[in-house]
Amino acid sequence: MSTQREAELACQDALLDSGTDTAAHAFRVTHSSSVPDWRTEDALFQALYKEFTFGLDAAATLANRKTPRYFGPDHPKPERRDALTVPYWKVASGNLPIFCNPPSSREEGLSLAPWLAKFVEQAALGCTIVAVVPHKTSTSWWSLVRRAQEIREIPHRVKFWLLEDELAIINAARAARAEGSKRRIKSGDSAGFDSAVVVFRPQPGVIQPACPRVVTWSYR
């Protein structure tokens, strides 16, 4: 296991041992065994970065962050370890747009609803937030997606990446859950679902914006 990964796991243990609800939440939302620390496909991020010039990655670790500034469970500042408890993202981002590939897991009971509600909240406070989410219109949280100003439907499956030691941990966990007969996960696998980019733009004082602009958007 890499020294970096050992440091991350030690930080995770410390968070869980702290016994606080915030620390436990920070661990679970970023380190679910069923939806782990997938790195967003570089081609997708670079296409978005060229357009938005992000100042913050709101759901990351030191190892997989897409910008120098990030929120995540191994952040050296405790108040920036759980994005959902940070009151003003705009300050942390240096007044620049914010990128987020929020974690979720049906198996772990982690819904995207809290993240989407946070995007709505932060947009009302003046933030521009660009998030990559599953394109699942039948979910209960999709109504929050429709509060964005723009929904970009990606016509192909997004690829996600992991370090080799992370893959070993994940595949071992799958085998322990009697999933050994399933194909082993590989770095660069395409997601098992369609994805969309949602853009929440600043709308101070607006509680319910108009219907979002929906477009087909390819970054390849």
Image: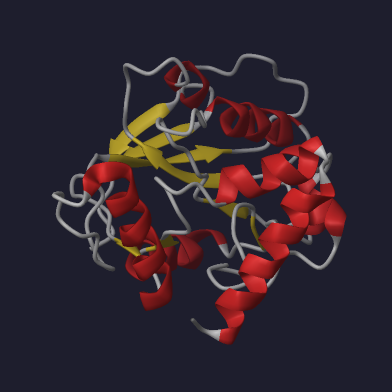
Q: In this view, does 143 lie to the left or right of 201?
A: left
Q: Which residue is drawn at 60% across and 34% down?
A: 115
Given residues 139 and 28, the one toward you in this image is: 28
Question: Which x, y percent locates residue 47?
Answer: 39, 64
Residue 114 drawn at (x, y percent): 62, 28
Give the camera-side residue of 75 and 126: 75
From the viewer's side, name the closer residue of 116 and 97: 116
The structure residue drawn at horizontal position 33% and vertical position 68%, both measured from the top left corner, is 43
Whether residue 70 appears in this view of the structure is: no
Q: Can residue 128 be seen in this view?
A: yes
Residue at image location 13% in from the left, 50% down from the top: 181
Indicate the quadrant containing the C terminus: top left, top right, bottom left or bottom right. Answer: bottom left
Q: In this view, does 212 lie above or below 42?
A: above
Number of numbered labels in the structure image: 0
Vertical comparison of 188 with 145: above or below:
below
Is residue 87 rendered to the left or right of residue 67? Answer: right
Left or right placement of residue 195 versus residue 55 in this view: left
114, 173: nearer the viewer:
173
Residue 88 % position (x, y): 82, 43
Q: Which colour scheme is used?
A: secondary structure
Residue 42 location, x and y as percent?
38, 70
